Image (cartoon, grey):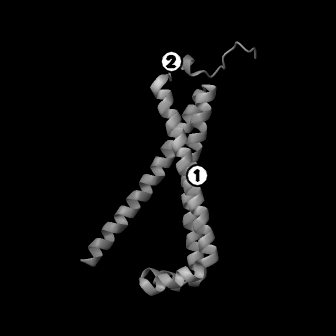
Amino acid sequence: MAMTELPEDHLLDTGLHLEGEVRQQLSDSARWSRFIAIAVFAACGAALLFGLVGGENISRSYRRISGFGEVFSLFGDAGFVAAVLIVAAAVVTVYYFLYNFSRKIKSALETESTAELNAGLRSLKIFFIITTVFALIALLNTLYRMIQQQ
């Protein structure tokens, strides 16, 4: 490919013009989503570390202060550690889609590739779908517990 030729998958060829503020907003979104995803990855790593190192003590504390520990008393301290591992793995999986959005959008802006732009937006859509489902499950669980307490 000669230096003067534009890539075949150029955003301008599709009639989509990403200029000025739109380009800046996408760039800012990519930067913030990358920061948030990396912060969540680090928090999950810390939770895993604390869960593995101090899982037994944390499990005993939960059993003393709430009914939450009753669930883990069936499985012992290993149950608590397994729960921490499962939750951390789920959160990392979900936030991978946010990180992937960041990577793809940054690449799309650099290469002006519609395929990368579409892939990035698809990752963001998946992230929002999964987080919405988790939020609805948490909301329904909270409502159910509130109804049971009355």
Position of residue 36 relative to residue 106, above or below, is below
Does dot 2 land on a helix, a strand or a loop?
loop
Of tags 2 and 1, the one toward the viewer is: 1
Q: Nearer the viewer, residue 149 or 21?
A: 21
Report the residue that reaches farthest toward the left. 150
The quarter holding residue 143 reads bottom left
Question: Which residue is painted at 55% across and 33% down in the image?
Answer: 118
Q: Which mark is residue 15?
A: 2
Q: How many numbered dots are placed on residues in this image?
A: 2
The quarter holding residue 82 reads bottom right
User: Measured from the top left, where is residue 60 in percent x and y?
Assistant: 52, 85
Position of residue 5 relative to residue 63, above or below, is above
Spatial distance from mark 2 to mark 1, Cα to Cα? 34 Å
Q: Which mark is residue 38?
A: 1
User: Measured from the top left, where is residue 117 in percent x and y?
Assistant: 56, 32
Whether residue 34 sits left or right of residue 68 in the image: it is right
Q: Residues within 10 Å of mark 2 (few under 14, many from 20)?
A: few
Q: Amino acid at mark 2?
A: Gly
Q: Earlier in the sequence, mark 2 or mark 1?
A: 2
Question: Which residue is painted at 57% across and 27% down in the image?
Answer: 114
Question: Which residue is painted at 54% across and 39% down in the image?
Answer: 30
Image quarter of the C terminus: bottom left
Position of residue 149 relative to residue 136, above or below, is below
Q: Amino acid at mark 1?
A: Ile
Image quarter of the N terminus: top right
User: Measured from the top left, where is residue 15 in percent x and y?
Assistant: 50, 18
Position of residue 51 relative to residue 29, above or below, is below
Report the residue that reaches farthest toward the top. 4
Question: Which residue is painted at 50% across and 46% down in the image?
Answer: 126
Does dot 1 land on a helix, a strand or a loop?
helix
Report the residue that reaches farthest toward the right. 1
Q: Nearer the viewer, residue 89 or 26?
A: 26
